[in-house]
Amino acid sequence: MTYSNSETRLRARTRPAPAAHPREPNAIRDANRPLPQFPIRKPSRTQSRAITLAAALLAASSGLSAASFGENYTLDLVAPTIDKWIYPFASNGGGPRPSGSSFGAIGSAGFDDRDAQLFAAFDTSTVPAGRGSANYHILSATFMLTVASGDSFRFDGSYDPVTTYGPTGVAINGDDAGRPVELYGAGYRNGFTSASVEENTPFRPVSAPAEGGRSIYPTDFAMGASIDGASRDVSNNVTAAFDPVPFAIGQIAPADLNPDGTAKEDATIVFTLNLANPDVLRYLQLSLNEGRVSFLATSLHPAAQGGPTVYPTYYTKENLLGGTPGQLDLQVQVVPEPSAVTMALCGFGIFVAGWRGRRVIADTEVAS
């Protein structure tokens, strides 16, 4: 029907809201309801005092340890506590002596590939020991040696894979000139530990030499769990055909090199430890926890009985010529473990929070 001359307005017809289907799930009906408003009860006076007291005690405990939190230490150790030449035929166990060298004996039966090595151990007790290895944050670590015999070996600042060594150690496969000086951690066997080693500790308890038998050996600490526990010995990595991961490769400044690439006398060899390597970092942390950090400088330079000296020799702390022995620079931050009081207060705070939460929920359920 239509209306032409009328002021009547048609109103839209309203339909009643459909009733909920008798089988409509409760979840759908409940979703359209407003959320219940649970009452939040204030804690009692006793509860408020307990919470305030816990917070105050926790703050006081934190203040007591604030002076020791994140303690920074800078170690500039100008000489090792112990340094010695690790070589089968070294007299008096390799020390004390004015110098020590590093060279290889690849292909020589009965000798390690890394035949002569220099050991250096530093007392780090000025950094508090026994704090737990994970609490030592190593910011930087640098070890340095000084060349005692110049014009003898050609500098090589890069790692040489095992595939570049021939059966007698001669360079093959287009390798560059020279061999690197590599730095490793120190491992121990034959009943010795980092704490029991001395200047005159013998190369091995029985007659020397013997492959894989030295009491102090270089390790890249692959999968090493403790300083004095079993860790990988890299002394014979060429024979065993594996590439270790050095803690650092020695670097020499251009001013300390001759035009032919050989190192000058008194040249400084700098080892910047690779702290991005978790094995290096773990080794240093465990060592600081014990209060002593030890290294072995090794190389695979050729050496021949009665032949020319084409390998590096380094000053030790007993030299009488004024040469600089091994040095260690460390920057460490020591983070203390939470005290028993702090842990107890934290536990109390958690208990109070949990207890309050249960009371609120319980009271709400009763109210509803």
Image (cartoon, helix red, strand yellow):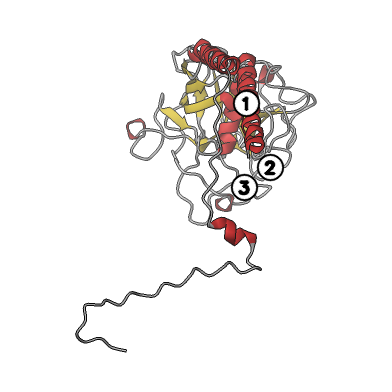
Q: Where is residue 169 in the image (x, y as percent from the top left)?
A: 59, 46
**Quarter of image, res 251:** top left
Quick check: marks 1 and 2 in contact, CB under 8 Å?
no
Q: Where is residue 89 in the image (x, y as percent from the top left)?
A: 68, 26
The label nearer to you, 1 versus 3, is 1
Cα distance, mark 1 to mark 2? 66 Å
Query: Amino acid type of disc 1?
Result: Ile
Cα distance, mark 2 to mark 3? 8 Å
Which sits in the foreground, 181 or 364?
364
Per the image, the residue denoted by label 1 is 350
Please tell me whether mark 3 sits on a helix, a strand or a loop. Answer: loop
Which sits in the foreground, 365 or 308?
365
Please tell me whether mark 1 sits on a helix, a strand or a loop. Answer: helix
Please tell me whether mark 2 sits on a helix, a strand or a loop. Answer: loop
Per the image, the residue denoted by label 3 is 168
Query: Amino acid type of disc 2?
Result: Ser
Relative to 151, 114 lies left or right = right
Q: Residue at x 53, y 48 (%)?
A: 35
Q: Which residue is drawn at 61% across and 37% down?
A: 220
Seen in the picture, residue 201 relative to 167 is either above or below; the reply is: above
Residue 346 appears in the figure: yes
Dot placed on the residue nearer the N-terminal end, 1 or 2: 2
Query: Amino acid type of disc 3?
Result: Thr
Q: Position of residue 142 (x, y in %)?
A: 47, 27
Which disc, if any, is residue 196?
A: none
Which disc, if any, is residue 108?
A: 2
Which sits in the foreground, 305 or 301?
301
* Residue farthest toward the bottom in the current orientation of the protein: 1
